[in-house]
Each structure stands twice: as structure tokens, then as C-alpha cells.
Image (cartoon, grey):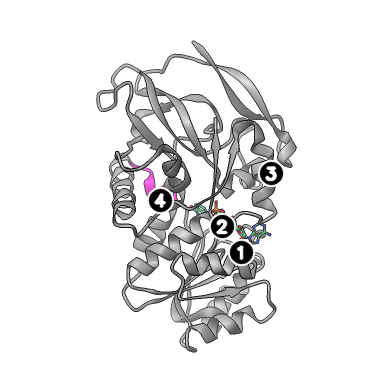
Amino acid sequence: MTTARAIRLTEFGGPEVMHLDTAEVPAPAAGEVQLRQTAIGFNFIDVYQRMGRYPLPSPTGLGHEAAGVVDAVGAGVTDLKVGDRVVYMNAGVGAYAERRNVPADKLVLLPAGITDEDAAAVFFKAMTAQFLVKKTYHVQPGDIVVVHAAAGGVGQILCRWAKALGATVIGTAGSAAKCEVARAAGCDAAVDYTQADWVAQVVAATGGRKARVVYDSVAKDTFLGSLDCTAPFGMVVLFGGASGPAPLIEPELLNKKGCLFLTRPSVFPHNADTATFRANAKDVFDAMASGAVRASIGARFRLDQVADAHRMAEARANAGAIVMTP
Ligand SMILES: NC(=O)c1ccc[n+]([C@@H]2O[C@H](COP(=O)([O-])OP(=O)(O)OC[C@H]3O[C@@H](n4cnc5c(N)ncnc54)[C@H](OP(=O)(O)O)[C@@H]3O)[C@@H](O)[C@H]2O)c1
């Protein structure tokens, strides 16, 4: 038994409900390893879960993603050893911690060329981009793709990866400065979607053809506009709700807008079994090695500054990923 500092929620609510506590960490059980965590990734889902918008069974730990070093190995674990560098993104909440036990089958070994910090900045977000561009809609050369919140953590990775697959990428973002970030992340054009005529600007940027696929993680403020940016028989992929839940629509609206397809996918079912998870992780590491995916770290915090990290994200003050050091 050892002790480690970890963020605990006392209740659901604003950033103030997160507290840094010291908790006991038992020796790893069979099938688990104990990690000394070195870098923790912030993801917007952490905000939804802290607020209670994506329900957790009870107020508990928080965070889905971290990189670290294996410090102890439980019975039956044969493919990892003390000293291995690893990363995870689907081992349940509790990543906001110095140390934790994690099922070995939820870990992947980090290639030598990827730092712990870059891994924590990229892994969850790139695993999301991976299923979005390869599975939910398989991006093809020549496709026109629209990515909302293109200067964000997932957004930048999604833009780079879609571009590497041969698409024309139109990004949207919340300011002129963030549009510059989106262009630097591979967008052929970028539109400030805080402007009233953003839909017309996006359609103009497609040359009037509209998009084969719109990746929408903003939802409340963008969803109806996304339908108008999508070409007939195209797909709207609603995969988050940074501005709030999407408005409810009648299915008939999809017909009126051009026989559109609408889906609402999640990264977790796409990585539910170990073999698929490991294959997807390899795809992400290969994309990092080729340069199609790269870390873009916008801000760094210590774990005891976690409330500031959440405030920054909710204020839309960051571009790229936020990483925390235990
Ligand atoms: N379905 C899945 O499996 C899955 C997995 C991972 C992430 N996601 C979703 O992907 C999105 C991006 O995640 P991320 O961690 O990389 O976050 P992020 O993009 O770095 O941050 C969210 C961005 O959303 C934009 N936004 C628009 N309206 C907002 C509002 N009212 N409040 C806050 N932000 C607003 C902001 O960019 P601008 O200032 O440019 O508007 C903000 O930077 C999130 O919606 C997340 O839930 C989904």
C-alpha cells in the first residue's frame, strides 16, 4: 500500500468541486499494473463529467488519459514490466492522480520517439480522430470536410489527419486568431463561426458544393448550421457538445436538407475490445510517426491547478491540448 495525491469530486458542479486529496493506492490486483503517472491529458469530457452532464455513478475521481511508468505488476501480467513507458485513454475515470492501478489490457507501450507529455496531449484526442476519419466516415481523397472547433485539441488533429488523407478541409473556430491556428493545422480555409453568416462563409469556401462530412463537437450553437453545410447524401457527425446539447429535430428535417445521414458516435465503443484498441493505437502512433498527427500543446498546469485548467477550457481561452503534471 502506498499513498498518492489525486483529484476527487465532492459533488458535481463548477471547477471548485475538484479537490486534491491524498488517497491510498493498494498493490495492483491480478491483471493490473501500478503506474507512476508523469503527464495527464485534459479532455473536454472531463468538464461534462465534472458538471454531471455526462453522468458518473457518483462523485469520484476524474480524467481519462495519462502517460507514465510501470512501477509494479500484478499477478498474471506478462506483456508489461517495471520501467515500461505506457499511455491509456479508456481505463475509467481517475487519471487526475499521481499514481493509480490500471488494467494491463487498457495500456499501450509508448514508442521511443514519443514523449510522455506528447502522449498525454494526443492519445485520447487522436484515438477520437482515428475512428472519426477511418470508421464513422472514411475520408477519401477529394472529399470536402468541415471540422468545427478546428483550433481545439481534437480539432487540430482531425484537420491534419483529414488533410493527410487527401481531403479539402474547412475549419471553423471562435476568433480570427484561432482561425489562424486552424490554418496552421492544415485547414485550406477557416471561418470564424461567431459571425452571423458563418454558414454562408463555409458554403462559399466549399465553392458551393458543400461538405461530404461535417464533424460537429460544438452542437447547440452549430448543429442546425451543420445541416446546411452538408452536401446531399452527406453525413453530419455529432460527437460532442461544447456549447450545450444539440437542439432536437424531426427526422424529416434530414430529408429536407438533402437525405443527410446523422450519427452520434463515441470513442469508447470503438475501443472496447483489446485487439481493436491496440490496432487503433498503432494507427495513431503510425500517424504520429508520419507527421499526419502531431502534439499541439496550448497550455500546461500542475495537478493542483486543475481548476484553472478547467476554467481556461470553458472560457475557450486555449488552442490545442492542455496537459497537467502530477
Ligand atoms: N465522441 C467522442 O468520443 C469524443 C471524444 C473526444 C472528444 N469529444 C468531443 O470533442 C470536442 C473537443 O474536445 P477537446 O477535449 O479537444 O476540447 P477543445 O476542442 O480543446 O475545446 C472545446 C472547444 O469547443 C469550442 N466551443 C464552442 N462553443 C463553446 C462553448 N460554449 N464553451 C466551450 N467551448 C466551446 C471552443 O473552441 P472555439 O473557441 O474555437 O469555439 C473550445 O476550445 C468536445 O466537444 C468533446 O466532448 C468527443
Q: Are dots 3 and 1 in contact, CB under 8 Å?
A: no
Measure the alpha-carbon separation of dots 4 and 2.
15 Å
* Label 4 vs 2, first from the N-terminus: 4
Measure the alpha-carbon separation of dots 3 and 1.
17 Å
Return the residue nearer the eye: 234 or 158: 158
Residue 67 rendering spot, x and y as whole percentages: 43, 35
Residue at the disc numbered 3? 51
> Which amino acid type is marked by label 1?
Ala
* Label 4 vs 3, first from the N-terminus: 3
Residue at 62% across / 78% down in the picture?
198
Residue at 31% across / 16% down in the picture?
75
* Residue at far bottom of view: 208
Residue at the disc numbered 2? 240
Relative to 48, is 57 above or below? Answer: above
User: Which mark's residue is nearer the viewer, 1 or 4?
Assistant: 4
Residue at the disc numbered 1? 219
Q: Is residue 289 left or right of residue 308?
A: left
Tag 3, which secondary structure? helix
Q: Is mark 4 within 8 Å of ligand 1?
A: no
State ligand 1's quadrant. bottom right
Q: Are dots 2 and 1 in contact, CB under 8 Å?
A: yes
* Label 2 vs 3, first from the N-terminus: 3
Q: Which residues are magenta?
A: 267-273
Q: Is mark 2 within 8 Å of ligand 1?
A: yes
Residue at 66% across / 55% down in the picture?
317
Residue at the disc numbered 4? 127
